[in-house]
Image: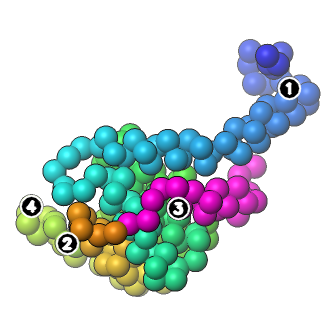
Amino acid sequence: MEVVSFTHMADGSREDYELLDAKEHDFVRSLPDRILVNLQNLDQSFSGYQVSRLEHSLQSATRAYRAGEDEEMVVAALVHDIGDMLAPLSHSEMAASILRPFVSDRIYWIIKHHGLFQTYYYAHHLGGDRNARDQFKDHRWYDDAVRFCEEYDQNCFDPEFNSESLEFFEPMLRRVFNHEHKVDLK
């Protein structure tokens, strides 16, 4: 196994960093595989809903697909709750961070804020402010986030809904996560 020569990053050579860059490129290329595994793991997420978190995600993506949304939005709908397992209190930010280099700024913003926007449907039942999303009322993508939650999130807990399978969405997921980064991460 090829490894770098340094133990402190400040001591790394050009060859060391070219090696790491190549390994990182290969690792990023395998991201769709890891995302698929994590989506499958949503089937084991916390219970209480009539459907699993995976089924919720499939319903979300299916609704977006059937509504004619572009692949970025369909894939964003599919992975919008992927952070539930590791970041249950900040899952929106985690999902948005995963999507960030691969989707438009608009879709990134929608996914990043969907957790707050979704509280519109339940916060008042728990003593919270259902209108907390209104702090973003003047943001250019406010209405888009409201629409995402209305059409692709809050209504995706139906055990009778006929969702497309994860395998159906896999080619879209691979295309979105395999194209050139939209954001320069260097």
Q: CA distance from mark 1 to mark 4?
A: 53 Å
Question: For the magenta stretch, what is the residue range?
Answer: 163-186
Q: List the residue tagged with mark 4.
A: 126
Q: CA distance from mark 4 to mark 2?
A: 11 Å
Is 104 on the left or on the right of 10, as rendered?
left
- The quarter holding residue 184 reads bottom right
Element on which disc 3 rests? helix
Q: CA distance from mark 3 to mark 2?
A: 30 Å
Nearer-N-terminus badge (1/4): 1
Residue 16's disc is: 1
Would residue 184 be counted in the magenta stretch?
yes
Q: Are the residues at dot 4 and dot 2 in contact (C-beta closer than 8 Å)?
A: no
Q: Amino acid at mark 1?
A: Asp
Q: Amino acid at mark 2?
A: Tyr
Q: In this rendering, which labeled residue sits more in front, label 1 or label 2?
A: 2
Nearer-N-terminus badge (1/3): 1
Q: CA distance from mark 1 to mark 2?
A: 51 Å
Nearer-N-terminus badge (4/2): 2
Element on which disc 2 rests? helix
| Res. 180 in view | yes
Would residue 88 be counted in the magenta stretch?
no
Q: How is the image coloured?
A: rainbow
Q: Amino acid at mark 4?
A: Leu
Q: In this rendering, which labeled residue sits more in front, label 3 or label 2?
A: 3
Element on which disc 1 rests? helix
Nearer-N-terminus badge (1/2): 1
Q: CA distance from mark 3 to mark 4?
A: 37 Å
Where 97 falls versus 150 (above or below)?
A: above
Q: CA distance from mark 1 to mark 3?
A: 40 Å
Residue 40's disc is: none
Element on which disc 4 rests? helix
